[in-house]
């Protein structure tokens, strides 16, 4: 078996870095703060929220949860979001998505203040990711992928990198972040011809397709680095990724587990983004 890319170790390293930065801000009289905007009480939102609140507390970041009714109108939602935008004590805003059907994300994404948008909801931050503008905020999950690769000193310069998945949540942004590190990037998806063969050319394979255990050893080049972004439930009801770990572990040189991989790092990235936002807003 190759090296296990342990997300918990990366998260601990990020926590140490974030704690130090939070301490420096507080010594200047600035208290970094994240406000979470949640509509209703979706169980997966609540689960992520608990993890995020615990991580913020551990990083000395203040938090507030703005819980809004499930049946809120678009007008009232926008009003509530603008209030958070204008709150001088809030440096980072996280809006849980997807929003209920009566709320139009295509309109709302233009309302959130880009400088406080710590998970890349605003088109302004999407554009900054595409341009490689470091003042923007990439989504937390793709950034977590990059933090793991960086921590384990994976050399991306010139590396053939294949991204399996083309969503705006992971696939496209992680491709841009890889390009920013001078990787040679191919984006693949369910309609890609000879998909296993294309993936098997990768030095670095990022699996973000959303299908349980889809990536078998046929998709993996001998000695490749494999990062599994998927979170699925298998036929036995157990949590698993997009990669068939048991089938791939002896072929990959490095491999993230699920759970304990990318997901473990995401809330640490969120905390790092809040500190970044707070620092930029206070110059």
Image (spheres, rainbow, N blue to C red):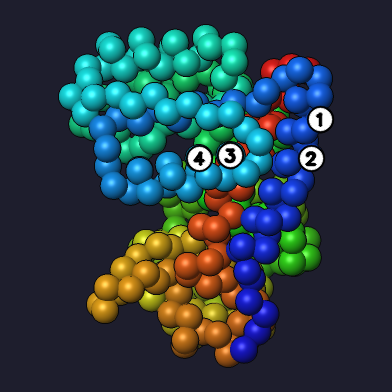
Residue 234's spot in the image, x, y percent? 30, 74
Disc 1, disc 2: CB below 8 Å?
yes
Lateral position of residue 274 relative to residue 215, left or right: right
Residue that mark 3 sits on? 56
Q: Between disc 4 and disc 1, whose residue precedes? A: 1
Vertical side of 229 occupied by 35: above or below: above
Vertical side of 187 occupied by 131: above or below: above
The image quadrant that residue 114 belongs to is: top right
Q: Marks 4 and 2, Cα distance to the nearest angstrom?
A: 18 Å
Residue that mark 2 sits on? 20
Instruction: Assign a secondary structure to mark 2.
Output: helix
Q: Between disc 2 and disc 3, whose residue precedes? A: 2
Instruction: Assign a secondary structure to mark 1.
Output: helix
Disc 4, disc 3: CB below 8 Å?
yes
Q: Marks 2 and 3, Cα distance to the nearest angstrom?
A: 13 Å
Residue that mark 1 sits on? 24
Q: Badge 4 local density, few (<14 within 10 Å), some, or many (20+)?
A: many
Residue that mark 4 sits on? 53
In depth, the one of 68 and 159 nearer the eye is 68
């Amino acid at each position: 078996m190759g090296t296990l890319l342990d997300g918990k170790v990366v998260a601990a390293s990020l926590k140490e870095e974030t704690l130090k930065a939070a301490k420096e801000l507080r010594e200047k009289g600035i208290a970094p703060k994240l406000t979470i905007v949640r509509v209703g009480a979706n169980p997966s939102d609540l689960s992520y929220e608990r993890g995020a609140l615990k991580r913020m507390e551990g990083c000395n970041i203040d938090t507030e949860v703005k819980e809004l009714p499930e049946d809120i109108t678009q007008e009232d939602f926008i009003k509530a979001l603008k209030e958070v935008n204008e709150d001088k004590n809030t440096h980072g805003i996280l809006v849980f998505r997807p929003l209920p059907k009566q709320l139009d994300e295509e309109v709302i994404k233009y309302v959130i203040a880009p400088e406080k948008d710590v998970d890349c909801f605003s088109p302004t931050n999407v554009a900054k990711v595409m341009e490689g503008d470091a003042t923007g905020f990439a989504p937390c999950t793709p950034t977590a992928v990059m933090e793991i690769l960086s921590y384990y000193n994976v050399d991306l310069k010139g590396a053939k990198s294949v991204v399996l998945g083309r969503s705006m949540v992971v696939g496209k942004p992680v491709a841009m972040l890889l390009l920013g590190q001078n990787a040679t990037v191919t984006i693949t998806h369910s309609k890609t011809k000879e998909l296993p063969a294309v993936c098997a050319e990768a030095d670095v394979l990022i699996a973000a397709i959303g299908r349980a255990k889809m990536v078998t050893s046929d998709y993996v080049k001998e000695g490749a680095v494999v990062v599994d972004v998927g979170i699925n439930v298998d036929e036995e009801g157990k949590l698993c990724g997009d990669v068939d770990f048991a089938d791939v572990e002896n072929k990959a040189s490095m491999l993230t587990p699920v759970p304990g991989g990318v997901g473990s790092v995401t809330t640490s990235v969120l905390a790092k983004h809040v500190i970044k936002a707070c620092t930029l807003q206070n110059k």
